[in-house]
Image: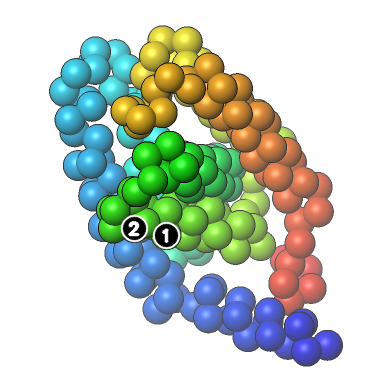
Amino acid sequence: MFLRILFTQLWFILSHKSFLWILLFINIFGTVYGYDWYMWQLEITEPKFWIFVPDSPTATLFFCLAIIGWLVKRNFKLMEALVLITLVKYGVWAVVMNFLTLAETGSIGWVGWMLIGSHFAMAVQGVLYIPNYRFTGRHIAIAAIWTLHNDVIDYVFGQMPIYHDLMKFSPQIGYFTFWLSIACIGIAMWSFKTRLDPLQTNR
């Protein structure tokens, strides 16, 4: 009973319009910062691959669009499917990569810890807003194709985010990334099948 009351109160805050506006501005800032972060890699990337390089900021861009939908009382269903899959995937991926860098080099500095914190928050917010998602199996299928195609571009065509200290582990990282994508697609399918509502009301 206590947990149910606590979650109900938490959801009231998370779904409040004022909080969504704050979350939108935070994610807009993070998206802009993320694209700027990737500028050096985009400069050495063929233009045809540009859309596939800045993975994390593109995921937060999807989230920004989903939030805008909620603010105007609409569900951009494809964006929501992309949000759940890519926010969790790239949030977890970046956290793991930075801890691997720490294990490999012994230090990641304040920037590395900032990346761990911000990407962990990405994954968390993707999961927290599961009750708001209204995507269908068709939207999951499209988002899954996008996600797995991105993995092919990254690890077959060599367009993965560059972590200089980890490049020698690219095959292993690619294998991990593929299964992380499958796991996140599975989360989306589970979400679609259960349609959990924190207030346990019909919508």
Which of the image's four quarters has the C terminus? bottom right
- What x and y, as percent, mark residue 202? 78, 68
The answer to whether mark 1 and mark 2 are in CB contact below 8 A is: yes
- What x and y, as percent, mark residue 135? 64, 45
- What x and y, as percent, mark residue 24? 36, 63
- Residue 112 to residue 173: above or below: below
Could you tell whether 170 is left or right of 175 in the image? left
The alpha-carbon separation of the residues under discs 1 and 2 comes to 5 Å
- Residue 31 to residue 143: above or below: below
Disc marking residue 31: none
Could you tell whether 155 is left or right of 179 in the image? left
What residue is shown at x 49% (from left), y 78% (from top)?
16
- Colour scheme shown: rainbow
- Residue 123 to residue 5: above or below: above
Q: Residue furthest top?
A: 157
Q: Can residue 80 be seen in this view?
A: no
- What x and y, as percent, mark residue 140? 65, 35
Q: Can residue 173 be seen in this view?
A: yes
Q: Mark 1 points at which residue?
A: 117
Task: Give the secondary structure at mark 2.
Answer: helix
Residue type of the residue flagged with mark 2: Met
What residue is shown at x 42% (from left), y 54% (from top)?
116
Q: Residue 44 versus residue 28: which sits nearer the camera?
A: 44
Disc marking residue 114: 2
What residue is shown at x 23% (from left), y 27% (from top)?
41
What residue is shown at x 23% (from left), y 50% (from top)?
33
Residue type of the residue flagged with mark 1: Gly
Task: Give the secondary structure at mark 1.
Answer: helix
Category of crowding for the residue at label 1, using alpha-carbon neighbours closer than 10 angstroms: few (below 14), some (14–19), many (at least 20):
some
Could you tell whether 10 is left or right of 187 in the image? left
